Amino acid sequence: MAEITPIPLAELTTLRVGGTPARMVEARTREELISALQEAWSQGEPWLVLGGGSNLLAGDEPFDGTVVLVRTSGIQRVEAPREGHVRLRVEAGHNWDDLVEYTVAAGLAGIEAMSGIPGSAGAAPIQNVGAYGQEIVETLVEVELLDEATGEVETVSADALGLGFRTSVLKQHYGRGAERSGVIVSITLELQEVGDGDVPVRGAQLRQALRLAADAAVSLRWIRETVLATRAAKGMVLDDADPDTHSAGSFFQNAIVSASFARTLPPECPRWPMAVEIEPVTVIPLAAFDGVVPPPVSVQPDVKVSAAWLIEHSGLGKGFRLPRSRAGLSTKHALALTNRGGATAGEVAELARYIQHRVQSEFGLLLQPEPVLVGVEL
């Protein structure tokens, strides 16, 4: 563990905003990461872990605490109980897209559609990262978690993380803290061995995004390269020379609404039905069974609707900026709030609030931000 001269968070985050912390520590091994956090927790000071800095909106004022830079890396193959599958244990600081490239090169399927997502592996479960219908919940087995309450590392199964649409028990939600406080030290994924040949493309959303037929079969490499090209066209692959990429990715989540509310939106608003949660089986004791089987309960699934469409159809097109602001919507993708050059966190937050207000006024729902907010309120 090395204490270093604090660096402004504006130099460490993809939105390029944020003040300078009081103290900064760089952790290059899991032991250093654990030690740095245990020390910060024992002193009762504010703390923040920073990996790729791609999902953070940090305030302009100095952060009065310790920022721990997670610089751990490494991938270890672990035997999987299922035939034809491989488990990978990945250190939290490992670059996510480097991990995806590793799996594609090794012929391991399960995260290829999440190519090009910036950030680190340890951050992925916190918001159940996903793209084009593929989410980490589908392949995550467990995480090693350094629990703030105990100061100890424990193995936590994916089932215990409460993984949902862009959420988990570890995520700080808009307006409230995380249900459980701790830091992921490593993640374990289980992936399918498919080699370098063509494989069927699972998921209607992925097939639609890649313009593939329902029976299409392509290679993992083709999926990765096509996803990267698609993301780059939307300004969603980091490029120092392109202000459209100076963002936190999609700033707002696609809205999850009831089926009845979705019917109040214009029919042309893109929407995708969410999976129905199956109720536990009702067990009727044989002695009490009267021969009548209760009818199944009909449940209408919630609906995911396009936040980008809602933003654009509330009158805020790509490239929109408030007067005299250096923050603006990407010229390529209406979901990305970007730093056009020298913007402050305050300007980004002002734009976000304005977008929320316009969408709520027009359609009656409040868009929820995806990035973690530190020292900033919307």
Image (cartoon, rainbow, N blue to C red):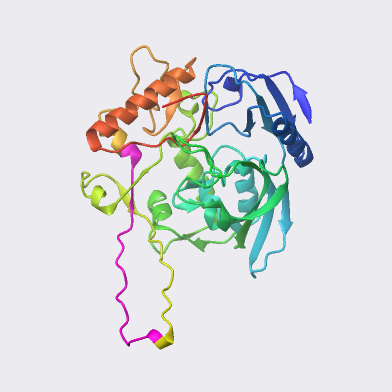
Q: Residue at x 64, y 20 (%)?
A: 21
**258 inside magenta stretch:** no
Q: Which residues are magenta?
A: 288-309
Of residues 256 and 147, the one nearer the viewer is 147
Q: Residue at x 63, y 52 (%)?
A: 103
Query: Does residue 366 show up?
Result: yes
Of residues 83 and 166, the one nearer the viewer is 166
Of residues 38 and 257, the one nearer the viewer is 38
Residue 295 x/y as whole percent: 29, 75
Spot the residue most to the front. 288
185 relative to 172 in the view: left or right: right
Residue 222 x/y as whole percent: 52, 51
Is 54 located above or below residue 193 in the figure? above
Residue 212, image quadrant: bottom left
272 relative to 236 in the view: left or right: left
Of residues 188 and 195, the one nearer the viewer is 188
Residue 217 x/y as whole percent: 47, 61
151 relative to 294 in the view: left or right: right
Q: Quadrant of the C terminus?
A: top left
Q: Quadrant of the N terminus?
A: top right
